[in-house]
């Protein structure tokens, strides 16, 4: 596996504080300690892809896999989300927009195009850790106003952190 790769949905890191509740609500976590259940990995990855692109199958799954606690080159089955899962994704997107005052008038598609579907350079850093350098754009003055931290992404189901440089 290469240690560096380009990813197309680098803005998914903006959902960092939402992922535990999302994964609990859609029932993809199992075990003690909790991990994304292997049988649910395809669904979890599809949900993250849907958040970023409005499609379950779009793009390289590397970053969604890492955010699910898997290796970026893991095999992941194609999954079509149920309507309830799509509705949950839209609710999460609406929550992100509502809680980020600088973009409150932005549509879900506007959020996707401006911030979520951003190119990034993903690099392996040490034991299970990653660095994600997100492509900069003029709109990024608004990223400085996000009222939560996403510079270090680490959830209980991830083997190591993702350090984000935006």
Image (cartoon, helix red, strand yellow):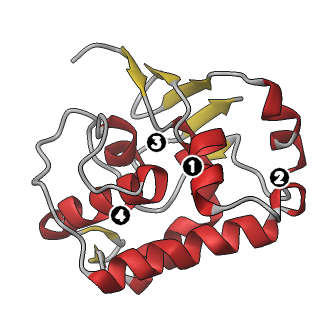
Q: Nearer the viewer, mark 3 or mark 1?
A: 1
Q: Nearer the viewer, mark 3 or mark 2?
A: 2
Label 1 or label 4, whichever comes before in sequence order:
4
Vertical order, 129 against 87 (above or below) = above
- Position of residue 50 in the picture relative to residue 57 (left or right): right
Label 2 or label 4, whichever comes before in sequence order:
4
Q: Quadrant of residue 102?
A: bottom right
Label 1 or label 2, whichever comes before in sequence order:
1
Q: Nearer the viewer, mark 1 or mark 2?
A: 1
The x, y position of residue 97, in whole percent, is: 73, 65
Report helix, strand or loop for mark 4: helix
Dot 2 alpha-carbon crowd within 10 angstroms: few under 14, some 14 to 19, many 20 or more: some
Circles 3, 4 touching at the beta carbon (< 8 Å)? no
The x, y position of residue 16, in whole percent, is: 60, 57
Report helix, strand or loop for mark 3: loop
Report helix, strand or loop for mark 2: loop
Dot 1 alpha-carbon crowd within 10 angstroms: few under 14, some 14 to 19, many 20 or more: many
Which residue in the protein does label 2 denote?
Answer: 146
Label 3 or label 4, whichever comes before in sequence order:
4
- Position of residue 100 in the picture relative to residue 64 (left or right): right
Which residue in the protein does label 1 denote?
Answer: 112
The x, y position of residue 125, in whole percent, is: 48, 22
Which residue in the protein does label 3 denote?
Answer: 160
Which residue in the protein does label 4 denote?
Answer: 47
Q: Residue drawn at (54%, 26%), measured in percent from left and top?
A: 131
Cα separation, mark 3 vs mark 1, equals 26 Å
Q: Residue drawn at (80%, 69%), measured in percent from left and top?
A: 99
């Amino acid at each position: 596996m290469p240690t560096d790769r380009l990813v197309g949905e680098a803005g998914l890191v903006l959902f960092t504080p939402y992922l535990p509740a999302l994964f609990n609500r859609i029932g993809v976590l199992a075990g003690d300690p909790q991990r994304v259940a292997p049988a649910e990995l395809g669904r979890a990855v599809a949900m993250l892809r849907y958040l970023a692109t409005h499609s379950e199958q779009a793009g390289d799954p590397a970053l969604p896999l890492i955010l699910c606690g898997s290796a970026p080159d893991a095999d992941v089955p194609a999954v079509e989300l149920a309507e309830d899962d799509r509705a949950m994704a839209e609710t999460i997107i609406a929550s992100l927009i509502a809680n980020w005052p600088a973009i409150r008038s932005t549509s879900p598609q506007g959020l996707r195009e401006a911030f979520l579907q951003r190119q990034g350079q993903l690099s392996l850093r040490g034991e299970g850790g990653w660095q994600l350098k997100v492509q900069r754009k003029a709109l990024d003055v608004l990223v400085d106003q996000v009222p939560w931290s996403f510079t270090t992404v680490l959830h209980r189901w991830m083997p190591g952190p993702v350090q984000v440089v935006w």
